[in-house]
Amino acid sequence: MEVVNRQLDKLGVDKITLSISLFSVLFIATFILYDAEFAKRTIDLSYKSIVNVFGPTYLVLTLFCFFFLLFLCFSKFGNYKFGGNEASAEFSYISWIGMLFCSGIGGGIIYWSGVEWSYYVGNPPFGIDPYSSESFSLATAYGLFHWGISAWSIYGIPAIALSIAFYKYNLNSLRLSSSLSGLGISNIESSFLGRFIDLIFILATVGAAGGTIGSYIPMLSSGFSEIFNLNKGLYLDILVICLCVGLFGYSVYKGLDKGIKNLSNFNLILALVFLLIIIFSTDIIGLIETSASGLFFSITHFWDMSTLGISKKSQFAEEWTIFYWAWWVAFGPLVGLFIARISKGRTLRQVILGMLFFGTLGTWLFYMILGGFAMNLELSGEFSVIQSMNSFGHADTAIAVVKNLSFEILMVFIFCLITIIFVTTSYDSMSYVISYHVMKTSNENKEPDKKLRLFWAIILGILPAALVIYSDHSVALDIILITSLPLMLIYPLMAISIYRELIQ
């Protein structure tokens, strides 16, 4: 034990934060595996209770984030530069955009973009007839809405709050509690409130991390089954997890410059190539028409989609919009911590516009091209996505859509590779940020040690493994919403802290 203590002191680790973090991971994994049925009932009941009581609050919070960021961006505060007026950017603009986008999206954009519209066309809100031409346009619009400006606005609040605190006070660690430095609480990271907020962050990060990869593994397994003619099952799922965790560890061990940055740059190029192949493999005119009508509906129905479920209950909003906003809230502080770390020398306006414009543009390209291709398969009768969803489920259908492209095995391979790298860049960002999070604020180390980063890359694989062994992937998605609730209550405090810091 004494040897361990000396090593932790050498690495500059805050032992209390580390202990809480490890306990959180092991507790949640043990809870799920010890009594799977009880865990499922408890998590499902908690999910429904949160949606019933706090659902409208998520909708109001998202609108607040959007308008607050617009205010900051276009006011005099937009010129505020992180690190001081003389600070220079650590990363090129292209690399910065790449890391920003990849850390904020992960594998979700691949998992959902091709087939999300199929959930909506049979049950559209606003009195639109199911399976009508309007319902298909609205279905495209909802994909753009759920992954667009509103989502990136939720990321923006913690990103700005943490960037201000990190560079203004020259902090040696990145913690969520630092985002409240503007509230005037002395040494907030070591206070009871700060410790509590950091505990919430760890729980939310573990839940969100485990929930996302736990839901993506079946799709990756389905893809590898097609490529290598393997039988789908638990062993293949575990193999895919080991592959992902191995890549997480390699990337985070290499660090920001050689690991995460290079993977992000490579994946952006690979994703663009993948989308270009789709464009030239399908009816371009039909793709443009589908995308344009969806984009038009997303603009004209933006306010209606944003407020659906606030004044009165909406089953559609509860099942989809509230779920998505909870997802972004759960990931918001984590993405914000990483964006803060890479945004030295950027102005507040650059960070906000970079997130709202480039983040939204990247997700929209996937939804309009991959989603539009899948929708056109349905409309042309070449392949029934809706029937496949009903018969085989989300994961297998996502792979089946890609198989309808030319060079199907090659495209499935590229599709799976993009997913793995997106998940990897998201997870190594998590490992990097949590490693920062468990360091002492007063230590002399400016970067988390490689051993610490590698350790967290492995630890973050525990919960996804538990969820895959448990094999009920709906639980993975429910966990995301549950862990987002306490974080949602911190967002208004971060906004107050931002404003107070900027007016000083």
Image (cartoon, rainbow, N blue to C red):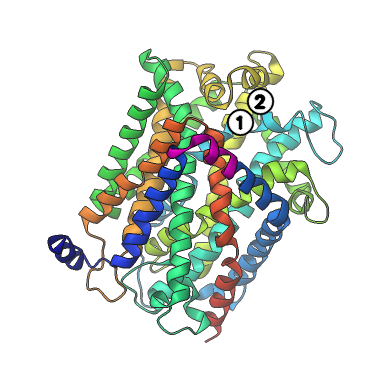
Rendered image quadrant of residue 71: bottom right
Counting from the top left corner in percent of width and height, residue 5 is at: 18, 65
Q: Using the image, tell me which numbered label, if any, was put on residue 375.
A: 2
Is label 1 in a helix, a strand or a loop?
helix
Q: Mark 2 belongs to which amino acid?
A: Met
Whether pointer 2 and pointer 1 mark residues with C-beta atoms closer than 8 Å, the reply is: yes
In the rendered structure, find residue 312 and report the number of the disc placed on it.
none
102 on left or right of 241? right
Regarding residue 84, the answer to whether it shows in the image is no
Split into 4 quadrants, where in the image is the N terminus? Answer: bottom left
* Magenta span contains residue 41: yes
Residue 149 in the magenta stretch? The answer is no
Please state the extent of the stretch shown in magenta in the rendering. 34-43
Left or right? Give the position of 147 relative to 257.
right
Q: Quadrant of residue 492?
A: bottom right
Which of these two is toward me, 110 or 273? 110
Residue 250 placement (x, y as % from top left): 25, 43
Camera-side residue: 303 or 191? 191
Amino acid type, residue under disc 1 in the picture: Gly
Residue 40 placement (x, y as % from top left): 55, 38
Viewer-proximal residue among 375 and 250: 250
Q: Which mark is residue 371?
A: 1
Q: Around disc 2, counting alpha carbons within 10 Å, would you say few (fewer than 14), some (14 to 19), or many (20 or more)?
A: many
Mark 1 neighbour class, 10 Å CA radius: few under 14, some 14 to 19, many 20 or more: many
Position above or below: 355 against 16? above
The image shows residue 171 at horizontal and vertical percentages of 34, 74
Question: In the figure, 399 relative to 67: above or below?
Answer: above
Give the residue at x 55% y 82%: 500
Which residue is depicted at the point 42% across and 20% down? 233
Up-down relation of residue 330 to residue 238 (above or below):
below
